[in-house]
Amino acid sequence: MTKKVFLNLGKQPVTNSYLKNLDNLDKEYFYNLKVTYNDKNNLVSLKNFVKPTMMFNSKYAHRASSSKTMQSHFKELSKECKKKIKNINCLEIGSNDGVFIKNFSKKNTIAVEPCSNLANLTNDMGYITYPVFWNQKISNKILNKHGKRNLIFSANTMSHIEDLDEVFTSIKKLLDKDGVFIFEDPYILSVLQTNSYDQFYDEHAHLFSYLSITNLIKKFELRVFDVKILNVHGGSIRFYICHNDGKYKKKRSVSRILNIELKNKINKFQTYKNFANKIRRSKKKLLKILKDIKKSKKLIVGYGATYKSSTIYNYCNINSKLIDYIVDTTKNKQNKFTPGSHIKILSPIKGLHKEIKYIFLAAWNFKKEIINKEINFLKEGGCFITHVPYPRTITLKNVRKEIS
Ligand code: DWN
């Protein structure tokens, strides 16, 4: 056995394909979302990959700056990088709306972002941004034009790239002798521990562990010298990578994380099968909560038209009969419909009013930020519904323990 399917999340649409209207639904694209575990390199990946241009294009909706949590997260990291590396010349792969690079000088920073609407944004901000997918061609171009980089950074992008060998081949060439490649993505162990199966969708071609990344980079003579577990996006992992002969000493965090992963058996197929069973139960429980509320004809509003929630809605067959509509602060998602599930997206100003008593926390990864912002909703008798780590309701009575 090498790659084996452990989870089948059914027919799923392209998560970024928000619909302007509900005409021509027969043209909507669907693929089978199945998740595999590879026992040769411990990597968790999708079985069927969606064509990158279908996901990442000039209509890309997600704005990384849309949460305060993420803005301060990247600001903190930029401070850490400035302490660690002298005279930074930075490259960011997948720069979105510039939430990370805006903390660095325009002179020494380069970005690569395949969604041209986002690349236009950071080019307008004064950062050279190449509007292309990351591959050896663009890497060689940067090498010839701008030289080697002593900081290569990427957040929530490595997990989006199907061909990881291509990534590490190019990083090996472009990274300065004592340079650092830092990247962070959702952590498979957090997904297993919190039953957050919605981290599986078209864009997340892979979900990483320390074990899988060390297995993947070995042959490129790269090594992980530090690793951090982060709270953001429901549990992420950040890798600090250098050349095998780079100056960085291996930190204690590395053996600590390895032990945690082995203790949690992330190298055993049975772990993934157990997870899949829990997900089937989670689906039933969530549907029961929503259907019980609907019996009393109350409105249920989704909070955040997240890409993640597309997996929940389509896997659990949730449509506008269960979730009346969704609110989201992102302007270019508003007044559109979610892919596959066809639920209308409104601005919070339009959609959040006194009559609403039930909110499904689709952006559960920002639970603390959202609950703090919407505390009056709870004070007025409102109730949040979440599925992470298990389906339940959050009221004023139990909110403290939820956000502490
Ligand atoms: O990797 C990815 C992550 C980082 O971002 C991508 N593949 C796509 C995207 O995934 P997502 O949509 O699941 O990410 P978020 O960051 O969980 O999305 C949150 C959504 O909720 C945004 O559309 C903004 C919205 N939101 C809101 O309306 N009010 C968020 C907050 C905090 C709020 O207060």
Image (spheres, grey):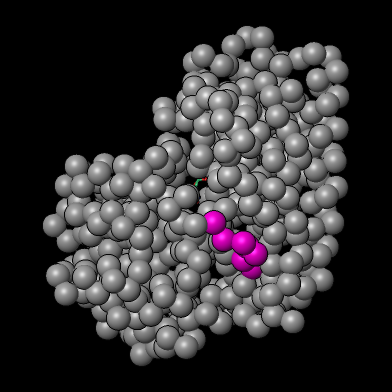
| Rendered position, 364 above or below 151 | above
Where is 74 relative to 248, above or below?
above
For the residue pair 246 and 272, the one nearer the viewer reads as 272
**Identity of the residue drawn at 41% across and 75% down:** 166
Q: Residue at x 82, y 53 (%)?
A: 278
Residue 188 visible? The answer is: yes
> Which image quarter: residue 23?
top right
Can residue 78 be seen? no
Q: Left or right: 70 with respect to 132?
A: right
Residue 296 on image: x %, y %: 84, 14
Task: State the image coordinates of residue 289 (x, y, percent, origin top left).
Answer: 82, 30
Does the stretch in magenta take in 109? no
Of residues 179 and 199, the one drawn nearer to the viewer in this rendering: 199
Q: Looking at the picture, does residue 279 appear above or below residue 252?
A: above
Percent x, y of residue 1:
74, 82
Q: Looking at the image, which residue is at 79% across and 58% down?
A: 276
Q: Nearer the viewer, residue 14 or 273?
A: 14
- Who's the residue at 63% across and 18% down the image? 377
In magenta stretch: residue 46: yes
Quadrant showing the C terminus: top right
Judged left or right of residue 200, residue 155 is: left
Relative to 34, 237 lies left or right? left
From the top left corner, tell me how far across and down residue 366 is, in percent: 56, 39
Task: Between residue 110 and residue 74, name the one nearer to us.
Answer: 110
Instruction: Say how many tags the image has.
Output: 0
Residue range of the region highlighted in magenta in the rendering: 44-50
- Taking the image as shown, residue 171 lies to the left or right of residue 1, namely left
Q: Quadrant of residue 200?
A: bottom right
